[in-house]
Amino acid sequence: MAFLAAAPLVWILALVAAQRLGELVLASANTRRLMARGAREIGRGHYPLFVLLHASWLVAIAGTTPMHTRPSWPLIGVFVILQLLRLWVIATLGPYWTTRVITLDDAPVVRRGPYRFLRHPNYWVVAGEIAVLPLAFHNWPVAAVWSVLNALLLRHRIGVETAALAPRRVGGQSRAVGGTDGSGGD
């Protein structure tokens, strides 16, 4: 127990890794159910890059942060708030939340929860996480490098989602669900 108290980096990264794995399990189950209903995956080729980005981010934090670094607890608090926002996104999308771009032609538009206020709320959460967690351990190089990489991937991903939704827009309104703009993505 003393080890955990002396090295919060270890248990915080373990919790984040466990959360990410749990999210992948949920996303995979939701994706299977949506595909069984006739959904399609769009932009499959870039998905492994997101997996690599997130896994390497955790490895980079672990590998470049001295184990006994004392965190900035206020920034850990910000990270916890970001997790609550992520849960809000996931709860709002329910069975339509996935980590891939999945389109389902007859799905309703999700316009409640964080989607009332912001486009791509989960991407905003992830951008915050990628910066805040390493900064909480005084590791600005990881925050900077992975934030830039994430921004580049998101730029592509948002374009893929927009293109996937284009055929489903009727009179300026999308019939999409899931994802950050209703397409079934992250």
Image: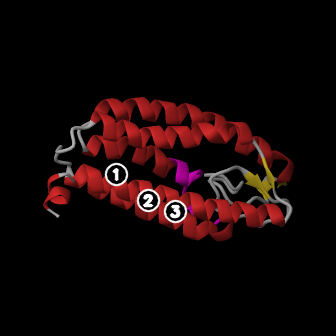
Residue extent of the magenta highlight? 111-123
- Crowding around mark 2 (Cα neighbors within 10 Å: few <14, some 14 to 19, many 20+) is few
Rendered image quadrant of residue 18? bottom left
- Crowding around mark 1 (Cα neighbors within 10 Å: few <14, some 14 to 19, many 20+) is some
Whether pointer 1 and pointer 3 mark residues with C-beta atoms closer than 8 Å, the reply is no
Q: Viewer-proximal residue, 128 or 169? A: 128
Residue 59 x/y as whole percent: 39, 40
Specify whether residue 115 is in view: no
Please tell me which residue is depicted at 51% across the width and 36% down the height of the picture.
150
**Amino acid type, label 1:** Leu
Q: What residue is pinned by disc 3? A: 22
Residue 13: give its label: 1
Mark 1 → mark 3, Cα distance in angstroms: 14 Å
Mark 1 → mark 2, Cα distance in angstroms: 8 Å
Residue 6 x/y as whole percent: 14, 54
Quarter placement of the N terminus: bottom left
Q: Is 176 placed left or right of 155 in the picture?
A: right
Q: What residue is pinned by disc 2? A: 18
Q: Viewer-proximal residue, 111 or 85? A: 85
Colouring style = secondary structure
Secondary structure under badge 3?
A: helix
Whether pointer 2 and pointer 3 mark residues with C-beta atoms closer than 8 Å, the reply is yes
Give yes or no for residue 121 being in the magenta stretch: yes
Please tell me which residue is depicted at 48% across the width and 60% down the height of the picture.
86
Q: Is 28 placed left or right of 124 in the picture?
A: right
Secondary structure under badge 2?
A: helix
**Amino acid type, label 2:** Ala
**Amino acid type, label 3:** Gly
